Image (tube, grey):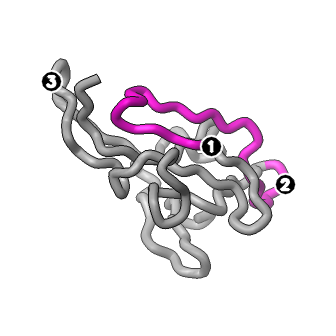
Amino acid sequence: DAETGNWWLKYEDIYVGYWPSSLFTTLADAANLLEWGGEVARPANGPRLATKMGSGHFPSEGGDGISSSVKNIECLDATTNAFVQPTAAVAVAKVKNCYDINNVGSTATDGYVIYFGGPGKSDT
């Protein structure tokens, strides 16, 4: 928001909420990195948790209606002031036997898409 400096989350034409500008004091002009997806935390050096990410299904089990997804991902290009799809997205899953990600990329119907999730704790 150019007037307040707040960072808004918008879904279709609905403003869902915002993060106050006070949380992002170094992002007044632009960001050089964007991240999206899921995250599960655990105590340092603690056991792996049986916490599901998203629906609890891996992306390899199926896309729509099975694993979690983020669709129509866009970034605001500070130079052109236009929304654009990511161009250099990298998929990272730190514990692939618990959680995984599928960076689908640009699609004709849903824009830029990622699928992610998993059941959590694994004995392997």
Identify the residue position indicated by label 3 in the image: 46
Amino acid type for the residue under numbered disc 3: Gly
Q: Eyeballing the image, is 94 above or below 110?
A: above
Q: 95 or 57, which is in the foreground? A: 57
- Residue at 74%, 68% in the rendered image: 109
Please provide percent x and percent y for residue 107: 75, 58
Q: Is 20 placed left or right of 29 in the picture? A: left
Q: Which mark is residue 118?
A: none
Q: Look at the image and say whether residue 101 sits in the magenta stretch.
A: yes
Query: How far apart, in angstroms, are the residues tagged by discs 2 and 3?
Result: 46 Å
Please provide percent x and percent y for residue 98: 34, 35
Instruction: State which tag comes first along the sequence, 2 or 3.
Output: 3
Q: Look at the image and say whether residue 48 sits in the magenta stretch.
A: no
Residue depth check, mark 1 versus mark 2: number of the one nearer the observer: 1
Outermost residue, bottom direction? 13
- Looking at the rendering, the stretch of residues picked out in magenta corresponds to 79-103
Outermost residue, top direction? 45
Question: Chief secondary structure of the magenta span?
Answer: loop
Identify the residue position indicated by label 1 in the image: 103
Q: Eyeballing the image, is 95 above or below 54?
A: above
Q: Is 76 placed left or right of 6 in the picture? A: right
Q: Is 43 placed left or right of 13 in the picture? A: left
Mark 2: which secondary structure?
Answer: loop
